[in-house]
Amino acid sequence: MKRGMRPPQPGPAILDLLIEDRGLTITAAARLMDVSRKQLSEVVNGIAALTPEMAIRIERVFGSSADLWMKMQADYDLWLADNSGKLDHLKPIDGKQPQKQAS
């Protein structure tokens, strides 16, 4: 079953709500989080997925729940996988599985 509308990626929301709303640059936020500018930039620009470690860094620096950001990433990842077309050939089984006969 296809999932509905594409959920938002967490990266752009992190950039908007946590970094830019505080008047920070990506470089300044990266320093506070003790990550490279490139690493943070890839997450907030939707190039790289948010990792659990990055979510915890966000929680510790900005006070925003790591669980919230990881759920947002999981919802986005599930939508992508379900809508990729790669799994469309898989169908549910009907009834019981046949029993293997003893040799």
Image (cartoon, rainbow, N blue to C red):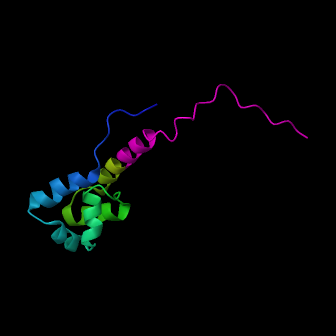
Q: Is residue 1 left or right of residue 54?
A: right
Q: Residue furthest left?
A: 23
**How many discs appear?**
0
Looking at the rendering, which quadrant does residue 37 occupy?
A: bottom left
Residue 30 placement: quadrant = bottom left
Is residue 64 found inside the magenta-colored segment of the image? no
- Pick the quarter of the image with the C terminus: top right
Please indicate whether residue 14 sits to the left or right of residue 81 in the image.
left
The answer to which of 86 and 39 lies nearer the viewer is 86
Residue drawn at x 39%, y 47% is 77
| Residue found at x 44% / y 44% | 81
Residue 50: percent from the left, percent from the top?
Answer: 33, 58
Q: Residue furthest right?
A: 103
Magenta stretch in the rendered image: 74-103
- Which is the main secondary structure of the residues drawn in magenta? loop
- Residue at (35, 57) in percent of width and height: 49
| Residue 34 x/y as whole percent | 26, 74
Residue 75 vs 66, above or below: the answer is above
* Rendered position, 50 above or below 31: above
Question: In this orientation, which residue lies closer to the viewer: 100 or 90?
Answer: 90
Depth check: give the residue in front, 37 or 72: 37
Q: Residue at x 34, y 53 (%)?
A: 70
Residue 102 occupies which quadrant of the picture?
top right
Q: Is residue 90 magenta?
A: yes
Can you give x and y, in whole percent of width and height, for residue 46 in the image?
29, 55
Percent of width and height locating residue 92:
59, 30
